[in-house]
Image (cartoon, rainbow, N blue to C red):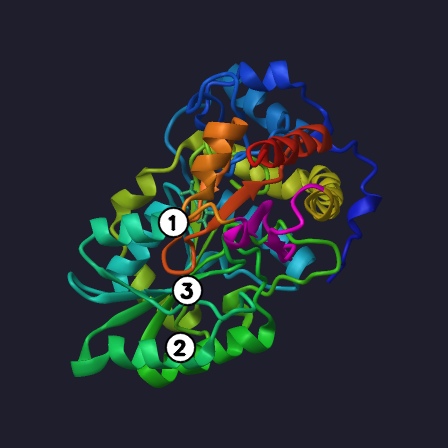
Amino acid sequence: MTRIPHEMSGEPNPLRALTLDRLRSRTSMKWRAYPEDVLPLWVAEMDVPLAEPIVRSLTDALELGDTGYPAGTGYAEALAGFAEKRWGWEVAVERTAIVPDVMLGVVEMLKLVTGPGDPVVVNSPVYPPFYMFVEHMDREVVEAPLGADLRIDFDALDETFRRATTGGRRAAFLLCSPHNPTGTVHTADELAAVAALADRHGVRVVADEIHAPVTAGGVDFVPYLRLPGAENGLSLMSASKAWNLAGLKAALAIAGPAAAADLDRMPEEVSHGPSHLGIIAHSAALRYGTDWLDALLAGLDDNRRLLVDLLAEHLPVITHRPGEATYLAWLDCRALGLGDDPADVFLRRGRVALSSGIPFGTGGAGHVRLNLATSPELLTEGVRRMAAALD
Ligand SMILES: Cc1ncc(COP(=O)(O)O)c(C=O)c1O
């Protein structure tokens, strides 16, 4: 396995490439949900141009009129090459399936291992769609809150698994790895403990690993399915977060060896959902976009450090543990005395849009999530606006 230091790619920092005017002409959710005077640092879109190999792959496809239905295992093979180099993990291409996106993939995996009314355990605070999608599919979300150190609390998880499986109910654990919003990267020991606990209680693990490529310098991501004991796990991976491809829909479901038969039961029509152009873009990212990714990761390392400095200078009362992965920062604002929803105050008085912690579930009140995948200038402006909201 080759570990590539972030700063060695030679590519320019993509977070510095776009002006605010250019960004404001975008029509995606980040830039259209709020009025023009609001600086958006909320939803997980990045303020970067597309990596050149992705542009080239899409342009070639458009020139060719290659806009039909997706086919083959090209995406899984591209991920396998990336995963081998980055994580020393061999993806079994024959145990993969393309799915429309990660959340719809999560829904399909949960359908394979649970039935209506069954519990799905999550580690709150967690990505709000975990609640929305799971409830929409008629499963019951059961929280096993993270510990005060923002890592998995194994006593809480054990007890929650025990309660969830009482009376022989089928239960699943929707693991967020790395964890959104805290940026926690679960260690190999923690993941092995998850697998052992799940096995003991007969709980099936579905791992959402969408943020896996976006680790901080010196931090190793461990794919859940690489661990002994995780053989009946299911994972969802995608290039969407790391290369800013949310509008080019595609993702991969991957089964451990003991979950292959489950994945085989996924209806064929689910794999008709991803966009062929999405698969072309994601595959190009994983195959040819690693220099660009390394430049991004170096820029994010800088931004994580910058945010620590900015908070120390302007908002020292906020408690913040810099993430080990993702481009999201989880800020504990409770000491500011702004109530359960400080994001609302920052928006109304500071004209900066952050994600409210409340929809992240237990542990979210009094917190905000800040997206630091922007230029150092806009990050600085965002914190200045947060501070101005308190004047
Ligand atoms: C943990 C997590 N899962 C899933 C998604 C959404 O992925 P997709 O757009 O592929 O459904 C996100 C987006 O930010 C996320 O943070």
Determine contact: label 1, label 2, CB under 8 Å: no
The answer to whether residue 316 is magenta is yes
Tell me which residue sits at (29%, 45%) in the image.
270
Q: Residues within 10 Å of mark 3 (few under 14, many from 20)?
A: many
Q: Position of residue 59 (x, y in %)?
A: 57, 19
Q: CA distance from mark 1 to mark 3?
A: 14 Å
Q: Position of residue 58 (x, y in %)?
A: 55, 24
What residue did someone put label 2 on?
A: 156
Where is the N terminus found, in terms of image quarters? bottom right
Q: Which residues are magenta?
A: 314-336
Q: Please, what is the three-letter code of the amino acid marked with disc 2?
A: Ala
Q: Nearer the viewer, residue 87 or 135?
A: 135
Q: Please, what is the three-letter code of the amino acid marked with disc 3?
A: Asn
Label 1: which secondary element: helix
Tell me which residue sits at (42%, 51%) in the image.
127
Mark linked to residue 175: none
Q: Nearer the viewer, residue 13 or 205?
A: 13
Tell me which residue sits at (62%, 14%) in the image.
21
- Decide if residue 340 is on the left or right side of residue 298: left
Label 3: which secondary element: loop
Mark linked to residue 358: 1
The answer to whether residue 257 of the structure is visible from this angle is yes
Disc on the earlier residue, 1 or 2: 2
Q: Position of residue 323 (x, y in %)?
A: 62, 55
Determine contact: label 2, label 3, CB under 8 Å: no
What residue did someone put label 3 on?
A: 123
- Decide if residue 250 is on the left or right side of residue 212: left
Q: CA distance from mark 1 to mark 2?
A: 21 Å
Q: Please, what is the three-letter code of the amino acid marked with disc 1?
A: Ile
Disc on the earlier residue, 1 or 3: 3
